[in-house]
Image (cartoon, rainbow, N blue to C red):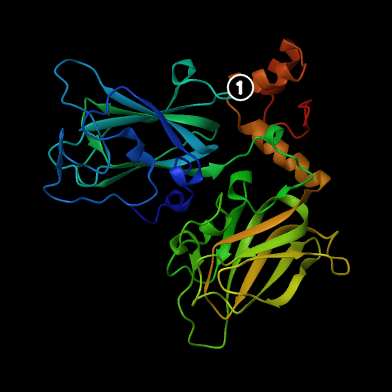
């Protein structure tokens, strides 16, 4: 895979680690479909045979003896805009599919697999190489909730990576009280001094880190500087409580940390340098003079001098401008049918809903009830 592709560094929206699920597959005789979205890289142990043959860390179907294709449907853990897909055939050499295609759809609520419809092509039928990471850029900029992998005609795929930008549904959030730095709410890493051991995106991922490797860790510094990471918030807002979690980092936690925020008047402190303890969830109210009401769009975490941190949470509220931007981004990226459904549910007439959808991108908020 070409690591230089910008989309390859975006979060994996389908990963089990962020809540993805393989909700259906028409066949999984040799290897379970759930392996497709495991966060860990695939592994292989030669001569490990089960009752159905060699055990593979992937999804593998039986050999087809009739025309047709095999398919698996993945519910994205983070609905959003898909920028690229990787179909990884690691360790599948004589049993990989020669071709694949990928589709996506956007669904309201929690439908059963057979209720999904209006599939849109993201990746046309394309050749695959065996034992390889096969990358495919995606140009469709709409927000989707599910993807469907089709392999032609059968075979094994180790992992399916769906890289993109999360786009949260504002109807499911309290915009006056949320984690402004959460990846699932649309926040993103905007800069980082060092990511030697692990990605800084782990800092803002959902849930708690289960092991040290699920956090952000830098190399050991041998100079007088310090490491830092900056986060573009889900929207402009006021941060009221910061959580700096060093869980699992024991001999390699930072000694100290500070926070600063980017507002209309530039960068200013949010949290003065404070001492940290290893393997601890630290929670700091931001109640200093002027800090609790300061609007920021980006926050920088400085750690001194280096080390690792499991999670960064920045709890607060979106401002009026941040709220408008947050809701409009979601609405403007919805596929047409879903956007019309959303407006109809909010009491907008069919004619007005169609007109509003066709006029996108809109700059003013329709009646969403959020």
Residue 55 versus residue 136: which sits nearer the camera?
A: 55
Judged from this view, the residue extending furthest toward the right is: 289
In the picture, measured across the screen, residue 343 lies left or right of residue 71, that is right
Q: Position of residue 229 (x, y in %)?
A: 59, 67
Q: Is residue 317 above or below residue 118?
A: below
Instruction: Determine which residue is flagged by label 1.
Output: 338
Q: Is residue 129 above or below residue 302?
A: above
**Quadrant in the rendering for residue 304:** bottom right
Q: Residue 358: tell me if it is visible.
A: no
Q: Is residue 317 above or below residue 73?
A: below
In the picture, measured across the screen, residue 231 lies left or right of residue 272, that is left
The quadrant of the picture occupied by the C terminus is top right
**Residue neighbourhood size for the residue with mark 1, other residues' Cα within 10 Å, grouped as few (<14), some (14–19), many (≥20):** some
Residue 245 versus residue 66: which sits nearer the camera?
A: 245
Q: Is residue 167 above or below residue 118?
A: below
Q: Position of residue 359 (x, y in %)?
A: 69, 24
Q: Position of residue 95 (x, y in %)?
A: 15, 36
In the picture, measured across the screen, residue 216 lies left or right of residue 60, that is right
Q: Secondary structure at mark 1?
A: helix
**Quadrant in the rendering for residue 89:** top left
Q: Position of residue 311 (x, y in %)?
A: 58, 60
Q: Residue at x 63, y 45 (%)?
A: 185
Q: Residue 149: tell me if it is visible.
A: yes
């Amino acid at each position: 895979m070409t690591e230089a592709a910008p989309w390859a560094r975006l979060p994996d929206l389908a990963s089990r680690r962020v809540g993805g699920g393989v909700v259906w597959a028409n066949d999984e005789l040799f290897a379970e479909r759930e392996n497709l979205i495991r966060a860990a890289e695939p592994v292989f142990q030669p001569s490990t045979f089960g009752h159905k043959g060699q055990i593979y860390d992937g999804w593998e179907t039986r050999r087809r003896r009739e025309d047709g294709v095999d398919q698996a449907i993945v519910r994205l853990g983070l609905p959003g805009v898909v920028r690229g897909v990787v179909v990884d055939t690691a360790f599948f050499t004589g049993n990989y599919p020669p071709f694949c295609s990928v589709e996506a759809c956007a669904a309201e609520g929690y439908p059963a697999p057979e209720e999904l419809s209006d599939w849109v092509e993201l990746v046309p039928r394309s050749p695959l190489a065996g034992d390889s990471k096969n990358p495919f850029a995606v140009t469709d900029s709409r927000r989707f909730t599910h993807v469907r992998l089709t392999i032609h005609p059968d075979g094994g795929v180790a992992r399916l990576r769906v890289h993109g930008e999360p786009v949260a549904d504002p109807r499911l959030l309290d915009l006056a009280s949320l984690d402004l730095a959460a990846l699932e709410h649309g926040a993103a890493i905007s800069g980082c001094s060092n990511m030697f051991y692990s990605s800084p995106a782990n800092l803002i991922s959902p849930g708690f880190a289960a092991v040290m490797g699920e956090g952000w860790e830098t190399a050991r510094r041998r100079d007088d500087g310090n490491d830092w990471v900056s986060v573009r918030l889900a929207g402009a807002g006021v941060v009221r409580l910061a959580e700096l979690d060093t869980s699992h980092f024991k001999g390699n936690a930072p000694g100290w940390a500070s926070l600063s925020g980017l507002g209309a008047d530039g960068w200013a402190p949010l949290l003065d340098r404070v001492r940290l303890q290893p393997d601890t969830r630290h929670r700091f109210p931001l109640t200093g003079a002027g800090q609790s009401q300061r609007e920021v769009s980006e926050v920088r975490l400085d750690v001194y001098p280096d080390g690792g941190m499991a999670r960064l949470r920045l709890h607060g509220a979106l401002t009026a401008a941040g709220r408008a931007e947050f809701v409009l981004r979601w609405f403007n990226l919805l596929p047409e049918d879903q956007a019309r459904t959303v407006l109809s549910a909010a009491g907008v007439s069919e004619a007005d809903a169609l007109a509003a959808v066709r006029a996108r991108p809109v700059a003013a908020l329709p009646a969403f009830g959020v």
